[in-house]
Image: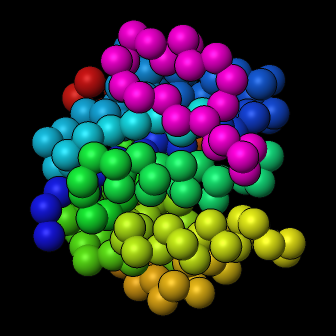
């Protein structure tokens, strides 16, 4: 199996941070998005951003920006489906999804999660959006989003038989995500110890 495509999920509302565009926040002199792209590096075949609204806000990164289309408002699974559709169009067999507010992703994440479906875990928690999805999950995901019912990422992941892949939390949690001012302060402290 070749390299997967990657999707950076940037659609959160960031209410606890005053509604800022989290992937564009800076820590240690670089945006979260730039740090995520550096972590993905050459391990993926292509990268897209999942976000609704004006795509121009991400134009400096030169990446495709995928809207949720007919499933806008249905949560992050809508972004995953848009990513799977895009990945299918560029001829890859799997999609690595990562949250747009996780600046310290481990290098080689896609390889560590292979083969799909797989989800990362650290500190006893599953990170359902740090996951490797097979393109074969597209139809099941489209059916789930078309039918009434819950939109929980965990439930869908379990339904397709996801494996859980644990990652160490030392010297920090590689899946630290920034939701609050305290998280941002913690990330700033870590960034002082991580090369930019």
Q: How many discs mark residues in the rendered view? A: 0
Residue situated in front as seen by the camera: 167 or 61: 61
Where residue 89 sits: x, y (%)? 34, 48
Point out residue 52 in the picture as x, y percentages from the top left corner.
66, 31
Q: Which of 45/41 is in front?
A: 45
Q: Is residue 122 above or below residue 62?
A: below
Which quadrant would the C terminus be assigned to in this image?
A: top left
Q: Is residue 19 above or below residue 97?
A: above
Report the coloring of the rendering.
rainbow
Residue drawn at x 60%, y 28% is 22
Residue 59 part of the magenta segment: yes
Which residue corresponds to the image point at 79% horizontal and 46% vertical from the top-left?
73
5 versus 69 height, above or below: below
Is residue 104 something one can see in this rendering? yes
2 relative position to 90: left or right: left
Viewer-nearest residue: 75 or 178:
75
Q: In the rendering, at what x and y percent does residue 40 appear?
A: 26, 43
Residue 86 in percent (x, y) is at 41, 47
Q: Residue at x 64, y 23 (%)?
A: 21
Residue farthest toward the right in the current orientation of the protein? 148
Residue 155 falls inside the magenta stretch: no
Quarter-wise, where is residue 17 in the image?
Answer: top right
> What is the quadrant of residue 56 in the picture?
top right
User: Quadrant location of residue 63?
Assistant: top left
- Residue span colored magenta: 52-72
Residue 187 appears in the picture as rendered: no
Q: Residue at x 47, y 35 (%)?
A: 49
Q: Quadrant of the N terminus?
A: bottom left
Left/right of residue 97 with respect to residue 105 in the rendered view: right
């Amino acid at each position: 199996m070749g390299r997967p495509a990657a999707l950076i999920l940037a659609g959160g509302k960031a209410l606890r941070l005053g509604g800022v565009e989290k992937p564009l926040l800076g820590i240690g002199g670089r945006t979260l998005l730039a740090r995520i792209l550096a972590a993905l590096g050459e391990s993926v075949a292509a990268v897209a951003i999942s976000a609704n609204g004006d795509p121009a806000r991400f134009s400096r990164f030169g990446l495709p920006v995928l809207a949720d289309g007919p499933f806008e408002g249905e949560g992050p699974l809508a972004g995953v489906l848009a990513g799977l559709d895009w990945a299918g169009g560029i001829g890859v067999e799997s999609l690595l999804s990562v949250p747009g507010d996780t600046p310290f992703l481990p290098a080689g994440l896609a390889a560590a999660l292979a083969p799909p479906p797989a989800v990362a875990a650290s500190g006893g928690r599953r990170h359902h959006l740090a996951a490797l999805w097979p393109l074969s999950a597209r139809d099941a995901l489209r059916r789930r989003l078309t039918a009434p019912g819950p939109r929980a990422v965990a439930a869908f992941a379990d339904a397709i038989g996801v494996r859980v892949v644990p990652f160490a939390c030392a010297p920090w949690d590689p899946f630290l995500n920034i939701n609050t001012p305290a998280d941002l302060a913690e990330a700033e402290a870590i960034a002082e110890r991580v090369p930019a």
